[in-house]
Image (tube, grey):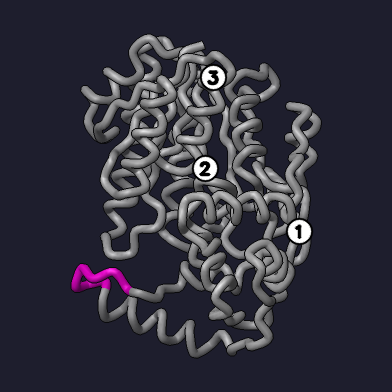
C-alpha cells in the first residue's frame, strides 16, 4: 500500500502517518506548514521517513501530484476552527477541495478513499444514542460543509470509499485540550452551565486503528462509520479525571451558561464582519452545552473494532506528554 494522508501535519493525520510508517506502509503527507505545531509535526514526520508535500488541495495540479502512485487516500484536511473567515471559505476547503481531490484520486487509480468527517453533522442530539443512520442536522457552517462533502464523496461511486465520522479526539500530540489541562493544573478552571452534557471522546491511538481498518478492510467499502470511544462522560466527570491527571483539583465553581452565550453572539455579530476572530464564540461553548451519546455497533460488527484506551489512562498519558514537552509543570 502507498497511503496519502491529507491534513497530515495536523494532530490526527500526523499520528496516522507515523503509525502507518511503523507498520511498514509507505505514507505521503499532504498538508500546510504554517504554525509552530505544524512545523514541529512536519519535522517529526520527515525524521521518521515520511514524505511531506506542502501545498493546497484547491490546486488541481497539486492534487494530481500528491495522489500519483497512491493506492489509498485518507482525507483529513479541513477548515474547522477558523472563526474570522466567511462561510465561502469553509465551502471552498471542505467541499470544493474534496471534489478536486476525488477527481485526482480517480484519475490516479486510487482503490480506496477514506473521508474523515465529523460527529458535528448531527448538530445537537438528545438523550438517545445516535448511530450512522440517525438524521444529520448540522448546526454550523463547519458541520454543514462536512455533510455536503460526504455527499460529494458518495457521488464518486466508481471510487470505493468509506466515510468515518470522527468524535472529539485527544491524546499525546493534541493541542486542542492543552488549555483545559493547563487551567486545571493551575486551579483556574470553572464549569460553565450544569456540566451534565455528555462526551464520547476517542483516543487518537484508537482512531488511527479505525482509520487503518477503513483503509484496508473489505467491509468498510460504501459504509459510514462512527469513530467514538466506549465511555460516555459528563463534562464534570471528564474535567475531574483531567484534574487528577495533572495533579489538580476538580473545580467547585460553576457559572451560568446564558451570559457567556449572549457575549459570544455579540462578539460574533460585531467582530466577524470586521475580519477579527472573536475571542469567544458559540462553537467554543459547545464543550459545555452539547451532548453526544453514540452506538458503536457498526464499527464492531463490520470491522471488528473496539476502542481500547479508557479516558483515565488516556488523560494521564496526555498529561505526561505535555509535561515531557514543557507544556505543563514538572
- Neighbour class for label 1 at 10 Å: few (<14), some, many (≥20)? some
The range drawn in magenta is 272-278
Q: Nearer the viewer, residue 146 or 311?
A: 311
Q: Which mark is residue 160?
A: 3
Instruction: Give me the residue at 67% from left, 54% from top.
Output: 316
Instruction: Give me the residue at 50% from left, 13% from top.
Output: 111
Instruction: Give me the residue at 67% from left, 38% from top.
Output: 206
Instruction: Point out residue 51 in the picture as x, y percentages from the top left corner.
Output: 36, 21
Kindly identify which residue carries mark 2. 117
Local secondary structure at mark 3: loop
Residue 327 seen in this snapshot: yes
Work out whether 243 lies above or below 73.
below
Work out whether 71 lies above or below 318.
above
Local secondary structure at mark 1: loop
Kindly identify which residue carries mark 1. 232
Q: Is 58 left or right of 315, judged from the image as shown?
A: left
Local secondary structure at mark 2: strand
- Neighbour class for label 2 at 10 Å: few (<14), some, many (≥20)? many
Instruction: Point out residue 309 in the picture as x, y percentages from the top left corner.
Output: 73, 44
Quarter of the image where one finds residue 40: top left
Residue 198 seen in this snapshot: no
Amino acid at each position: 500500500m502507498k497511503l496519502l494522508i491529507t491534513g497530515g501535519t495536523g494532530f490526527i493525520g500526523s499520528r496516522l502517518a507515523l503509525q502507518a510508517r511503523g507498520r511498514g506502509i509507505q505514507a505521503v503527507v499532504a498538508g500546510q506548514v504554517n504554525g509552530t505545531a505544524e512545523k514541529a509535526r512536519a519535522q517529526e514526520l520527515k525524521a521518521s521517513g515520511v514524505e511531506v508535500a506542502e501545498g493546497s488541495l484547491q490546486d488541481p495540479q497539486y492534487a494530481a501530484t500528491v495522489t500519483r502512485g497512491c493506492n489509498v487516500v485518507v482525507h483529513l484536511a479541513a477548515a474547522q476552527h477558523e472563526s474570522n473567515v466567511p462561510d465561502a471559505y469553509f465551502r471552498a476547503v471542505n467541499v470544493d477541495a474534496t471534489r478536486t481531490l476525488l477527481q485526482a484520486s480517480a484519475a490516479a487509480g486510487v482503490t480506496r478513499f477514506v473521508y474523515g468527517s465529523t460527529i458535528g453533522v448531527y448538530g445537537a442530539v438528545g438523550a438517545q444514542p445516535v448511530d450512522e443512520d440517525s438524521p444529520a442536522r448540522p448546526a454550523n457552517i463547519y458541520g454543514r460543509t462536512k455533510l455536503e462533502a460526504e455527499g460529494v464523496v458518495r457521488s464518486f461511486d466508481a471510487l470505493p470509499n468509506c466515510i468515518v465520522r470522527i468524535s472529539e479526539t485527544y491524546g499525546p500530540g493534541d493541542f486542542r485540550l492543552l488549555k483545559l489541562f493547563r487551567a486545571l493544573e493551575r486551579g483556574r478552571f470553572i464549569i460553565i452551565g450544569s456540566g451534565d452534557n455528555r462526551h464520547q471522546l476517542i483516543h487518537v491511538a484508537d482512531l488511527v486503528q479505525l482509520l487503518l481498518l477503513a483503509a484496508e478492510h473489505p467491509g468498510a467499502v460504501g459504509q459510514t462509520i462512527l469513530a467514538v470511544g466506549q465511555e460516555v462522560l459528563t463534562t464534570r466527570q471528564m474535567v475531574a479525571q483531567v484534574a487528577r491527571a495533572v495533579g489538580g483539583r476538580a473545580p467547585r465553581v460553576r457559572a451560568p451558561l446564558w451570559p457567556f452565550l449572549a457575549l459570544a453572539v455579540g462578539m460574533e455579530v460585531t467582530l466577524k464582519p470586521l475580519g477579527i476572530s472573536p475571542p469567544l464564540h458559540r462553537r467554543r461553548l459547545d464543550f459545555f452545552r452539547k451532548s453526544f451519546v453514540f452506538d458503536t455497533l457498526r464499527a464492531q460488527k463490520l470491522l471488528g473494532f473496539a476502542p481500547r484506551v479508557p479516558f483515565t489512562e488516556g488523560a494521564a498519558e496526555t498529561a505526561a506528554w505535555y509535561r515531557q514537552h514543557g507544556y505543563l509543570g514538572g
